[in-house]
Image: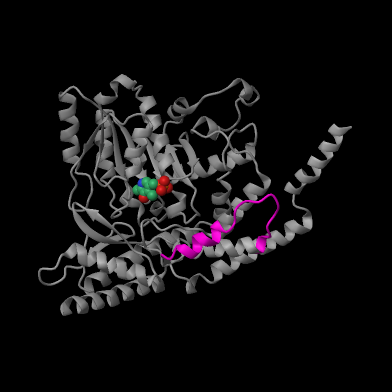
Amino acid sequence: MHFLEELEALEVEARKLEAPPAERRTMTRDVGTYADTFISSLSEKKTYSPDTLPALKALDALPFQEGPRDLGSLLNAMDTGINSTGINPASGGHFGYVPGGGIFHAALGDYLAAATNRYAGIFFANPGAVRIENTLIRWMCNMVGYPESALGNLASGGSIANLIAITTAREYHGIKAAEIPNNVIYLTAQVHHCVQKALRIAGMGEAVLRYIPMDGNYRMDTRALQTSVSADRAAGLRPFMVAASAGTTDTGAIDPLDTIADIAQAEGLWYHIDAAYGGFFMLSETLRPKFKGIERSDSIAIDPHKGLFLPYGLGAILVRNLEAQFNAHFYTANYLQDTLNAGAEPSPADLSPELTKHFRGLRMWLPLQLIGLAPFRAAIMEKVLLCRYAYGRLREMGFETGPFPELSIAIFRYLPPGQEDADAFNEQLVRYVQDDGRVFLSSTRIEGSYWIRLAVLSFRSHRQEVDLCLSILENGLRHLLATSALA
Ligand SMILES: *Cc1c(COP(=O)(O)O)cnc(C)c1O
């Protein structure tokens, strides 16, 4: 009977994995209260606090143990260890990199997806979950002007979305390993680095990368593109793909999408557009014309965790030719034979590297339903106007500015009088803003020069937050000019 006794003992312990109803209710309440307080107190919290030591100590003090810990003390440790240091992307004062979102309704979608743990990889396993994901993808396809027959995939972010596109393109063009060094990919120096990274992961690291010159607004020079393609073809190389950007990370520039479409079409290139940052500006009818030609592309990466203000963990790839995407990713195994009966919907597992996946569609579907589309359209246009407003104010304050913001990113720098090193001065100014911490700004280097970036994309950034940022910059400028005058 020893066996049954052991089994019984194991069961007693194993059953602790299921929280009893009363405990579930208190834990849900406590987590809800924590999240609620976190959001309600955001306006009093810093956007950036570089003080990492106490944070890491609070976390290191919690090694895993055989027995349980209580939720309250863990929430406290998370508050100190995670939610009080570094950049706070939930803050409306986040103007660095590409600000994140985090609308609360999406958190509920994640909570429900995890609590019900539906399997969204294969239509057979959960027709509804797959229908929801494909409905979201078709909604985005419709927004960019793709035909009904197009589809794509909900990935973890823009990087994986770009990777799926590049893999699809490689397979569609039937490129064999030995031919890779002969294939040419056209891009600009402003393309997001995840494109080069994806090319390497997709085995195309040895392909020729042709960096096309840009105009004064950091957009691809399409005459130079045409010249390059012709020259490469004449030299016996194989022009394969052009990767354009619809909203670059540095400045929000949109490449001349329609003209690139003409060239891609005439030359038989796979036309990929990275719209990870910029794509959702198409929700605004006013901004939509800026994207003319996007509908003629073969694939588009677009990030709902950027322009749709969702929490991190959701990027999408849209592919015009569903069959090409399927052929590049489909694989099956004997143990999946029950799932093969063709369903009414293509399955995400057949269209991406993932098999078992997070049901990430729910975090997008629920907010769109609960809130409706109008506030998203308003918010995306608001960000553009806020950026234009900041751009004008920065010029009044004496900053040198980059191109007029195409979307919601502006670059600027101060040219101090005299012989001073402008790069060092602006670096100090960024440090001043970061040390203040109420808002967060980041910087970049374009064609050798240091620029400060203002990226407005948090759904919590409104006029008040932009004004705060401008006043901190103004104080920083005054402070630095005073101290450098003394030196
Ligand atoms: C953010 C971004 C990416 C990368 O997407 P992730 O979601 O961070 O993986 C790619 N391209 C552009 C233009 C971006 O802004």
Quarter of the image with the N terminus is top right
Q: Nearer the viewer, residue 165 or 91?
A: 91
Q: Is residue 404 visible?
A: no
What range is drawn magenta here? 50-72
Q: Is residue 413 magenta?
A: no
The residue at the point 21 percent across, 69 percent down is: 399
Tell me where residue 186 sits by quadrant: top left
Quarter of the image with the C terminus is bottom left
**Where residue 126 sits: x, y (%)?**
64, 37
Q: Is residue 384 above or below residue 8?
A: below
68 sits left or right of 77 in the view:
right
The residue at the point 35 percent across, 70 percent down is: 435
Q: Is residue 212 above or below residue 462?
A: above
In the image as oriented, which residue stretches furthest toward the left? 419
Q: Nearer the viewer, residue 322 or 427?
A: 427
**Where residue 129 sits: x, y (%)?**
61, 41
The residue at the point 44 percent across, 57 percent down is: 100
Q: Is residue 377 visible?
A: yes
The way the protein has been coloured in the rendering is one colour
**Where residue 258 sits: x, y (%)?**
28, 42
